[in-house]
Amino acid sequence: MAAESLHLGVALDGAGWHPAAGREGSSRGAEVFGAGYWTDLVGIARRGLLDFVTIEDDLSGRARLDAELIAARVAPVSRDIGLIPTVTTTHTEPFHVSKALATLDHISRGRAGWQVRVAGSAAQARHFGRREVRELTAAERAAAVASGEFPQQVRELFEEAADAVEVVRRLWDSWEDDAEIRDVANRRFIDRDKLHYIDFEGRFFSVRGPSITPRPPQGQPVVTALAHAPLVYEFASRAADLVFVTPTLAEGPRPIVDQVAAAAERVGRTGEPLRVYADLVVFLDADEPGARRLARLDERAGAEFASDAAVFAGAAEDLADLLVAWSEHGLDGFRLRPGVAGDDLTAVADRLVPALQRRGVFRTEYPGGSLRGLLGLPTDVPNRYATA
C-alpha cells in the first residue's frame, strides 16, 4: 500500500469494546439506545476524516439496537463517511437484506456497506425457531482453533452465507440504472425491459427476483467480512470486497496477508483483489495513560480484557508509527475498535489522525463521492444483466 493512501475506519459497538466501557462517565452508556448517541459518534468519526464506521450487531442475548436501522437513522444527517452495518445471513432472507441495504445506499447517497456475519449458536437459532443448530462442544471449538479445520456444520453456514451474498448482489443488479423512466404523461414509471429475473437456484435459496428497490447508487455497495481462519478467508475471497483480519502485535500482519492471498488463489478469485484491513482494539492516552486506563477498566470488570484482535494501549504517536509500519506489509487499511467509545474515538479523531497527517500518510479533507470511491474500489460497476 502506498504510504499516502492509508485508509482508516472505526468499529462502533455500544459504549465501547471493553466490557466495562459503559461504566465510564464519558461513555454515555445510558444513551446507547438513543439516536443522538449514534449520530454524535459518527460525527466524531467524520471530524477525523475516517473512511467509514462499521456498526456491530449479532443475534445473541445482549441488548442492542439493529445496526442497519442505526445506519439508516444516521445517513440523512451525515456526509462523506461510509456507513457499514452488520447484518447476519444465517436467519435472514437475502431478499430483505438486499432491499434494506439498497435503501441505505439511496438514503446515504452512495455511502452504504455491509458487514456479513453468520450465526452459529443454538441459542441464536432458537430466537427464530425455524431450524436447529447443534451447539459445538468445547473440544470441537478448541480443535477448530488449533487446526483451522471446522466441522461440516460450520462450513455449511459459510457456504450458505456465500450464496446469500450472491443473491443480494444479483438483486442489486436486477434493476438497470435507467430502469426508472417516470413518464407521467404516459403513466409509465418503469421500463420493464430493464428489470431482470435473477433466477438463482442453489442449495439454500431459490430466488427469482427482481428486487422491488431500484439499483443502489453505488451499483454494488461495499461488502465486508471479519475473518480469523482460512475457511473464512476463503468465504471473504468469494463474496466480499474487503476483509477485516486480526494480526497479533508480536507477529504483525504479514502471515495473515499471505494466508488471505493463498485463500483467494484457492477459490480462484479474479478481478479486483480483496482489500485487507487489520483490526486493533485501542485505548489511547488522554487524561490518563491508555495502559493505566485499560488496567482500571479490567479491575472494574473483574477480569483482564481479551479480544480476537490485537490490543494497543498507549500514545497516539506510537499507534501512528505502528500503522505506518504495518502498512508496508500488504495491508490496505485499518479498522480501530475504541475500547471506550467516548474517549477513544475522540482520541482517534483528535490525536491519531493529526499524527498521521503530520507523517503525510492521511488525507486532510474528504474527496467527495461514494464509499467505493473513497476506498479505492471501482466506481463504475457494470450491471451483469444490462444489455448493450
Image: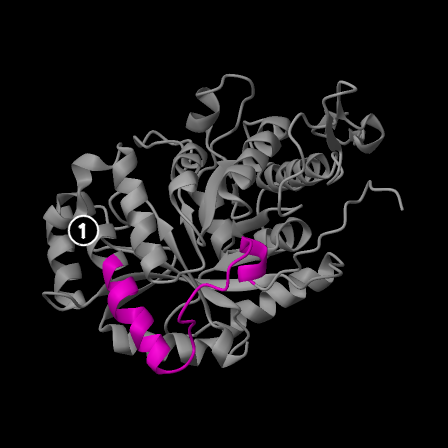
The image quadrant that residue 89 belongs to is: top right
Amino acid at the residue labelled 1: Ala
Q: Position of residue 296 (x, y in %)?
A: 11, 57
- What residue is drawn where x is 36% and y is 56%? 46
Residue at 20% x, 36% y: name it: 31
The type of colouring in the image is one colour
Left or right relative to 86: residue 359: left
Q: Callout 1: few (<14), some (14-19), or many (20+) C-alpha neighbours within 10 Å? A: few
**Quick one: 225 or 120, which is closer to the camera?**
225
Screen quadrant of the N terminus: bottom right
The reply to whether residue 328 is in sight is: no
Q: Nearer the viewer, residue 6 or 369?
A: 369
Dot 1 corresponds to which residue?
A: 303
Comparing 108 with 120, the one in front is 108
| Position in image of residue 387 (x %, y %) | 88, 42
Toward the right, the furthest residue is 388
Residue at point 57% right, 32% down?
A: 97
Q: Is residue 379 above or below residue 302?
A: below
- In the rendered view, does 70 fall on the left or right side of 341? right
Is 349 colored magenta in this rendering?
yes
Q: Based on the picture, tell me whether residue 129 belongs to the magenta stretch.
A: no
Q: What's drawn in magenta, residue-wise?
A: 346-375
Return the residue nearer the eye: 280 or 122.
280
Q: Is residue 121 above or below residue 260?
A: above
Badge 1 marks a residue whose secondary structure is loop
As drawn, 154 above or below 90: below
Whether residue 222 is visible to the viewer of this picture, yes or no, is: yes
Residue 335 lies, with reference to residue 188, above or below; the image says below
**How many labels, in total?**
1
Residue 196 horizontal/vertical position (percent): 80, 31
Left or right: 121 in relation to 387: left
Q: Position of residue 372 (x, y in %)?
A: 58, 56
